[in-house]
């Protein structure tokens, strides 16, 4: 039975997109079995390749020891059915797209096959657990856990009003086992507390760009110089995926009805043009090797 003292052995990841791959990577480098399932078989195949590439990149950079790669890769288990993925898992993490009804449907399917003592989490960026909990059939063992990019240490953890304290404690212990830093919300709020800070930045940046007040390059350059970060808001949105950014913003807009929460036309136009960010090769920047990674770009000396 998973608890705060027994190490987690198996994690089921339902949804093999960007975040599913990131979570699987975080598990396997700590030798925790990560089972991955998606309704699209091609997504599972792509996820396996992406996780293996992430591991290989870290070895090449010297962040991981090469002798442990075989063990890490063996911990990645692609699954052809949802039952195979979740049946014996200690933790089940849902990472499907940011769509409320889709998440409810998937969680309702998960409950059919999950072990009684399994914990379930959603990686949702903007949907509170209280909107989803009843779909799990075990609201007391359900919690929000919002992971970041590969190698980003912070994971925001947020219970809903009926999350059991033991579930929050188990989430903390699991994340510590993965070498991550749990940041725990004291009360439920749409979007998580610290993630809302990023959301406020993202929203303002999009409005500035839509209004023609600045360019992605200058906004990012200014941000990176001010805060000494390796990436700016526009670069980070490219990593997240502009379609995902749009979906998250629509969750806020549908909840509030506030016109200022509605994603700007600029974002819709970019998505229609296929400019989704890293996943499509072009967003605010072209990828791989975006401009902000070039020597001299930050100070404008690269031309």
Image (cartoon, helix red, strand yellow):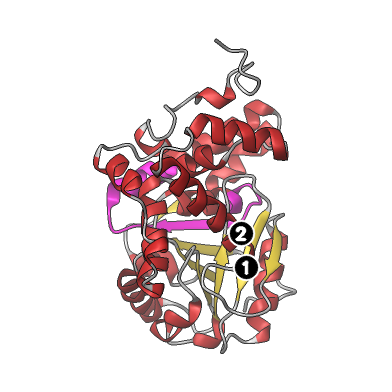
Give me the residue at 71% from left, 29% from top: 62
> Within 10 Å of the Cα at label 2, are there few (<14), some (14-19), or many (20+) other Cα atoms?
few
Tell me: 203 left or right of 71. Answer: left
Tell me: 4 left or right of 13. Answer: right
Give me the residue at 43% from left, 36% from top: 278
Q: Whole-percent x and y of residue 79?
A: 38, 57
Give the quarter of the image for residue 112: bottom left
Q: In this view, does 174 lie above or below 58?
A: below
* Residue 290 is a magenta residue: no
Total label count?
A: 2
Q: Report the span colored magenta.
A: 26-48
For numbered disc 2, what is the local secondary structure?
A: helix
Pick the quarter of the image with the C terminus.
Answer: top right
Q: Which residue matches tag 2?
A: 197
Pick the quarter of the image with the N terminus.
Answer: bottom right
Give me the residue at 48% from left, 41% from top: 239
């Amino acid at each position: 039975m998973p608890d705060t003292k027994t190490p987690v052995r198996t994690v089921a990841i339902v949804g093999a997109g960007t975040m599913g791959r990131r979570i699987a990577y975080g598990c396997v480098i700590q030798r925790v079995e990560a089972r991955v399932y998606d309704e699209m078989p091609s997504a599972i195949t792509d996820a396996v390749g992406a996780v293996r590439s992430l591991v290989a990149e870290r070895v090449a950079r010297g962040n991981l020891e090469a002798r442990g790669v075989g063990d890490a890769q063996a911990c990645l288990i692609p699954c052809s059915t949802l039952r195979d993925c979740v049946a014996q898992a200690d933790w089940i993490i849902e990472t499907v797209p940011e769509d409320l009804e889709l998440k409810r449907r998937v969680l309702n399917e998960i409950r059919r096959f999950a072990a009684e003592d399994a914990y379930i989490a959603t990686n949702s960026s903007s949907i509170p657990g209280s909107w989803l909990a009843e779909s799990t059939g075990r609201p007391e063992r359900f919690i929000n856990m919002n992971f970041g990019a590969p190698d980003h240490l912070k994971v925001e953890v947020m219970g809903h009003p009926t999350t059991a304290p033991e579930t929050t404690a188990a989430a903390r212990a699991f994340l510590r086992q993965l070498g991550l830093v749990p940041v725990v919300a004291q009360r439920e709020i749409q979007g998580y507390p610290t993630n809302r800070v990023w959301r406020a930045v993202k929203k303002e940046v999009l409005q500035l760009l839509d209004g023609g007040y600045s360019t992605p390059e200058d906004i990012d350059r200014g941000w990176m110089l001010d805060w000494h970060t390796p990436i700016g808001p526009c670069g980070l949105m490219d990593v997240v995926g502009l379609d995902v950014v749009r979906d998250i913003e629509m969750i806020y807009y549908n909840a509030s009805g506030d016109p200022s929460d509605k994603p700007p036309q600029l974002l819709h136009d970019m998505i229609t043009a296929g400019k989704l960010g890293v996943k499509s090769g072009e967003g605010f920047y072209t990828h791989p090797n975006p401009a902000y990674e070039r020597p001299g770009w930050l100070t404008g000396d690269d031309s």
